[in-house]
Amino acid sequence: MSKSDNQQHPIAIYLKIWALLFVLSAASYMVDYLNLQGYLRWSLIIIFMLLKAGLIVAIFMHMMWERLALMYAIMIPPLLLLTFIGIASLEADHTFFTRSVFFLKNLI
Amino acid sequence: MLHPAVSTSPLHSPELEPGVKGIVSDWSADQQSFKKVPWGKAMMWIFLVSDTFIFGIFLISYMTARMSATDPWPHSSEIFALTIAGKSIPLVLIALMTFILITSSGTMAMAVNFGYRKNRKVTFILLMITALLGASFVGMQAFEWTKLIMEEGVRPWGNPLGAAQFGSVFFMVTGFHGTHVSIGVIFLIIVAVKVYRGDLDNERPGFLTGRKGNYEIVEIIGLYWHFVDLVWVFIFAFFYLW
């Protein structure tokens, strides 16, 4: 019954990615440990996060060896979440504004 | 399972187109769109897409709660600090949990590799190490929750540290993730037992599904496990570090 092309790759690549994930995790922890703040902190957090996520999906989950039809079917739909993030942040800003106006009136 | 000859034959049709043309020909093909992928694996991927939306919605609602909170958001770096040898180290438990999960992802990837090599013993050992690391992750999370509830007084409806939404978001997001890890550990042990007994080599029918044993299931549970690690990457970045 063994018919499909199994995902068989050299062990070395897993070990390299594993080491890389360790380094990236340590780096993202250092962002907090060194107490970086502001845009530097946020951009570093996002860069390390995306690198880690990309390595896990591409190598550990074998996505880079799959056919494009599967790759696109899996990777494109979650991009919709970006739209949702946009809508939700507009909503959140509005909520914050109205809360500030109506509930923090005495504080300002 | 019912029609293996029909459903698997496109898997090794030699004339598969590469690139964008391949997307069109795969999707317009009869029978199945995801060539070279066993259907169990395709189904796991589709489940993971739905799970991505669940965690995505959780993290977006966290963003909304945090952006709209008028009270200051509790400082996670200090809340999750531990005092080790008289020195307070920020986020140390969370960092340890991150490394444990990454390590378990590494052992899982190796287990899949050794599984396809039909190396029963090594696959079993690697799967059990993965399950053990997963269980220790859940144990640390239980410790973290206990500390937060008993010592810091965090509740889903409020806490003495700042914005009341902190507790509800924390318990929902990490609780849901912890549940995923726990379920993963159970399934890892089930697959490990199947490997150990030689069910996959002997193509023994599964207890529930009746499908013939196959080392593909190691890769499929591996996909789930890597996904759990993936979600933690996002939780770690947005909830603990932000």
Image (spheres, coloured by chain):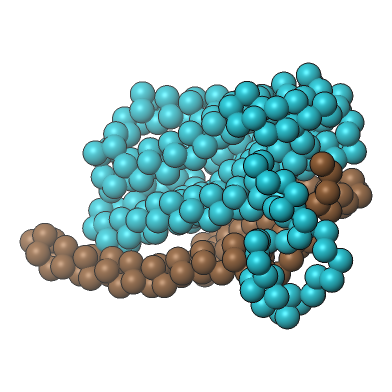
Chain colours: A brown, B cyan
Residue name at image x 25 percent, y 53 percent: B71
- Is B166 on the left or on the right of B214, as rendered? left
From this view, report whether residue A16 is shown above or below residue A46.
Answer: above
Q: Which corner quadrant holds the N terminus of chain A? A: top right
Q: In the orientation shown, which residue stands out farthest toward the bottom?
A: B21
x and y percent of residue A48 in the render? Answer: 64, 60
Q: Look at the picture and state if A44 lies above or below A86.
A: above
Which residue is farthest top? B197
**Could you tell me residue A55's position as x and y percent?**
72, 57
| Residue at 74% over, 32% down | B213
Q: Is residue B77 above or below residue A69?
A: above
How many numbered marks, from 0 up?
A: 0
Looking at the image, residue B101 sits to the left or right of residue B157; the answer is right
At 64% from the left edge and 71% from the top edge, which residue is drawn? B27
Instruction: Describe residue B93's horizontal placement relative to residue B30 as left or right.
Output: left
Q: Residue at x 85, y 40 (%)?
A: B116
Q: Where, by quadrant of the figure, is residue B222 drawn?
A: top right
Residue B81 visible from this viewpoint: no
- Looking at the picture, tell me which residue is in the foreground, A41 or B134: B134
- The C terminus of chain A lies in quadrant: bottom left
Taking depth in this image into account, of B50 and B62 the one nearest to the observer is: B50
**Could one spot residue B225 in this view of the protein?**
yes
Percent of width and height locating residue B193: 72, 21
In depth, the one of B90 and B168 nearer the eye is B168
Residue B115 location (% of width, % of height): 83, 36
Q: In this view, does A106 lie above or below B119?
A: below
